[in-house]
Amino acid sequence: MSIISWALKASRTFPGLVASLFGSPEIPPPKDTKAYLGLYKTDPWIYTPVWIIASTAAKAPRRIKRTDSDGKATFIIEHPLLDLLDRPNEDESAFDFFEATYANGELTGEMIWEIVPQKGFETPAELYNLRADRVTVVASDDRRKISGYEWRAQDGDEPENFEPEQIMRVVYYNPNDDWRGLSSVAPLADDIVAGKYATRWIRRFLRRYGVPDGALEADQPINSATIKRIEEKWRKKWSEAEDTTPVMVNGLKFAPYGQPPKGSGMLDLIRYIREAKLAAMGVPPVLAGLLEYAKYANYDLQLRAFFLITIAPKLLRLEAAINRSLMPHYPSPEGFKDEFEFDKRVMGFVDIKMLIEVLTDQFDMAGLTPDEVISLTGLGNQYSDGEKHYIGERRLPVEGAPAVEGEPEFDPNNPVDNSLQNLEQEAGLGDQLEPEAEREMPST
C-alpha cells in the first residue's frame, strides 16, 4: 500500500491526518469557492434556485421551546436570543441576514457567523455573516479539531484571528474533505461549462443576424492573396456593428452548413441544463416559473416536497448550530430546558387544517389529552387539567362521565372548549373547519 493510499484510508479514522502528513494546519477554502460565488451574478439558473432557497428559508419564524422536567413544552416568542436574531447587527434586517446565510450555504457549502460579544461580557451583541472564501480553518496541533479561524478581506491581507467560540459554522457534508463544506454548485461543474458553450453558440448566431455557419465557395480556384482579401472584406462588411447584407461577387457563393438553434438541439441542451441545476439544488420547476410540467394535481405536491426535502434540512442544520453556539449564553430557568427552533408549521411541512380535524376526532374519543394536542401542533400553551382525557362534544372528563343525549352547545366556561377554539384561531382556520356531516366520505 502506498503512503498516499494509507493516508487517505487513515483519514477516515480521524480528520486531519492527511493535513498533518502533507501540509500546514491551515486549511484554506477550496479553490473554486470564489468562482461559485461569482456564478450568482452571472448565471441566471444558479441565481434563481439559490435565491428561492435563501429567501424562503429566511422567512421561517423563530421561537424558543421551553420544556419542564415532566416533558411538557411551551413556546416562547420573547427571549434575548430571539431579540438578537431579530436584529443581528446595525446594518442588516433579520431577513437580509438569514437570506445571506442560506445563500452562502448553497454557494460555498458553509454558513459562517462571527459572534461579537458585548463589551465586558460573553453574551453576544452582534452577528455577522462571513464568506467562506475569506475564512481559513486552523487545525489543532494533533489535527483532531479546530483551534481557530483566520479571516482576510482580500487575498494577501494580514489575517484577523478568531477563537473557535467566536465563530458559528454550518458545514455541508463533503465526502472528500473533512474540514470544508461542499457547495451545492460543485456537482454542476460540467453542466455549467456546457451551458456557457451553448449560450456562446446562440449569441454568435444572433450576432450574425440569424445566418448559420457556412463557407464561401468559388467556381474556380483562387490564390491565397485573393482568399485573404475576400476574408478581410467579408469581416468588414459582415460585422455586428454594421447591419448590412453582403453581396456575392466574382462567382462566390455562400453555402450554409450550420443549423439554427432549434434544429441544432441547442435549445434542448439549454433546457436540460436549466432543469439539471434546479434538480441538483432541490427546487421544483414550478417555483422557478416553469409551468410546462405543472398541473393542479401536482402543484401542491411540488411545494410540499420542496419544504420537506430542501428547506427542512437547512433549517435543522442551522437550528443545531444555534443551540450549540449561541443558546449556552442564555441559561434556562431552573427546572426547564430552553431550545431554539424554527416554527415549521407555516413553512408547508404540515397541513394544519387536516391535522386539527384529525386531532379533534381523536380528542373527542378520549384518545388524546389537551396537552398532547397542544404539543403535537405547537399551538397554544399547556395548562392545568390538560393531562386529563375528555370524551364527546361536551368535553366531559372520562372519569365518571354520564351518558349524554342531544346535541351539546359550546360552553364558554369549559377550558377545554376554549382551548380547542383558541387552537383553531391560532392556526388561522376560524370557521374554515367543515362540520362533521360535510366531512363524511360520499357513498359509492
Image (cartoon, rainbow, N blue to C red):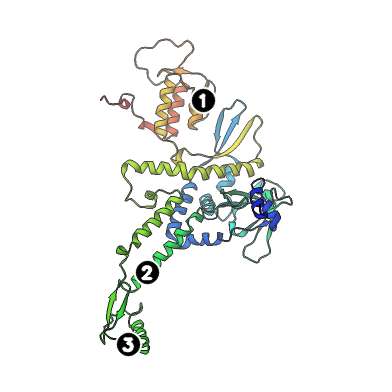
Answer left or right for 102 relative to 359: right
Give the percent coordinates (x, y) of residue 187.
49, 54
| Between 299 and 33, the one nearer to me in the picture | 33
| Residue drawn where x is 45% and y is 29% of the image | 422
Q: Secondary structure at mark 3?
A: loop
Task: Find numbered disc 2 in the image and state the secondary structure of the residue it sits on.
Answer: helix
**Residue 231 lies in quadrant:** bottom left
Distance, label 1 to label 3, CA atoms, is: 94 Å
Along the line of sight, which residue is nearer the eye, 52 or 10? Answer: 10
Depth check, front residue: 24 or 6: 6
| Between marks 3 and 2 in the image, the one whose residue lies nearer the viewer | 3
Q: Could you say whether the residue bearing mark 1 is in a helix, strand or loop?
A: helix
- Under mark 2, the amino acid is Arg
Q: Which mark is residue 222?
A: 3
Q: Amino acid at mark 3?
A: Ile
Tell me: 47 left or right of 222.
Answer: right
The answer to whether marks 1 and 3 mark residues whose Cβ atoms lie closer than 8 Å is: no
- Alpha-carbon span between mark 1 and mark 2: 64 Å
Residue under the point 28% across and 76% down: 255
Percent from the top left, x then y, of residue 18?
Answer: 67, 53
Mark 1 or mark 3: whose residue is earlier in sequence: 3
Which of marks 2 and 1 precedes in the sequence?
Answer: 2
Q: Which quadrant does the C terminus fall into? A: top left
Residue ID for mark 2: 203
Q: How many marks?
A: 3
Can residue 118 be seen in this snapshot? no
Mark before the other along the chain sequence, 3 or 2? 2
Q: Is residue 99 above or below residue 224?
A: above
Mark 2 crowdedness (10 Å alpha carbons): few <14, some 14-19, many ≥20: few
Residue labelled with disc 1: 371
Circle nearer the viewer, 1 or 2: 2
* CA–CA distance in space, label 3 to label 2: 32 Å
